[in-house]
Image (tube, rainbow, N blue to C red):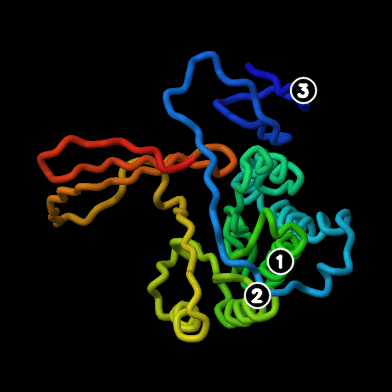
Amino acid sequence: MRTCSSCGREIEGDFTFCPHCGAALAAAAAPRQEQRKTVTVLFCDVTGSTSLGESVDPEALRGLLARYFERMKAIAEQNPTLAAQIKRWLHIPVLWDLEARLRMMDRFKGYKQILTLSLPAIEFLAPHDQSPELARLANDGMAEIVARHPDYFPAFVASLPMNNVPEALREMDRAIEKLGAKGIQIFTNVNGRPLDEPEFYPIFERMANKYDLPVWVHPTRTAKFAIGTVPRPPFWSGYRVMPTEIEFWQERPFRLHDRIAFTRADLNAPWTKTRLYP
C-alpha cells in the first residue's frame, strides 16, 4: 500500500492524487501506456457577484458551503440507510474540502471546473418541507466560491429541491437571476419517479422558455435497479447499430474521468483509438 509523501496517510487504490490532501502521488511501478495531457476548458464568465462575497474573508468563505454539509449530515444522522449511502462520499475530500480541490486543480495549468453538487440528490436527502432550505444553502455556497475563485470556477449550476416543484421554481429564479447560475442540475429520476411525469413539466418549461439555459442531468439509480439483471418486458425486440464513432467514459478520481473515442472512416475501415481527456 502506498503512502502519501505530503500528508503521510496510506492510499488504497489506483489514485494519481492523494484522496485526502490532493497532492500528486508517485507513479506506479508499471508504466502507463496512455499520455496525460493538459486540457484548458473555457466557459463564459459569471456576471457580477453577491454583496456577501465582497464582505466575507477567506476563512468565512469555507464556512458558507460547510453550512450545507453540516445540515446534510444532521439529516443523515436521523436515517441509518441514508447515512450508509453517503459514507463513501465523505471519504473523498475533494468533493467537499475546497482547499483539497484547489490543490488538485493547481496540478493542471489552466484547468477550470463548473461547480455542481455531487450525489446524493437534495430530494433524496430531505423531505419536501426541508429540501428547499438545503438547496438555498448549497447554491449560496457555490455562488460564493465562484465569486472568490473565478480563475478556478467560472460558473456554477444550481441545485433544486425536485420533491417540491413550487419551491424548485422559486429557487431556480433566485439562483439564476440573483446568484448568476448558468443552468440547473437534476437527476435521471426523482426518488424513483421518472422525469416525464406532468408534475415536473414546469421545470423544463421555465428553463426553455424563460432562461434558455442548459439542464444538466446527473445519472443515478434507485435500489430497484441495483447491480444485476435489468428487468425487461416479456415481449421485446431490437435493432442493429453500425456506428463509425463510439465514445467511452470511465470514472477516475477527482473527476478526471477517462474519455476514449473509437472512430473509423467507414463500416469496413479499422477502428482508431483516441484519448480525448484527460
Residue 209 location in percent, x, y? 46, 85
Mark 2 belongs to which amino acid?
Ala
Label 3 crowd bin: few (<14), some (14–19), many (20+), radius 10 Å: few
Q: Horizontally, is 274 left or right of 170 in the view?
A: left
- Disc on res. 72: none
Q: Residue at x 62, y 81 (%)?
A: 173
Q: Which residue is drawn at 73% across and 35% down?
A: 21
Q: Name the residue under label 3.
A: 8
Q: Counting residues from the N terminus, which is met first, the one under dot 2 or under dot 3?
A: 3
- Disc on res. 143: 1
Question: Helix, strand or loop at disc 3?
Answer: loop
Q: Which residue is drawn at 71% across and 23% down?
A: 4
Q: Counting residues from the N terminus, which is met first, the one under dot 1 or under dot 2?
A: 1
In contact (CB < 8 Å): disc 2 and disc 3: no
- Outermost residue, left side: 268
Residue 199 visible in image:
no
Q: Determine whether 77 is above or below 134 in the image.
A: above
Residue 233 location in percent, x, y? 21, 56
Q: Determine whether 162 is above or below 83 in the image.
A: below
In contact (CB < 8 Å): disc 1 and disc 2: yes
Q: Name the residue under label 2.
A: 175
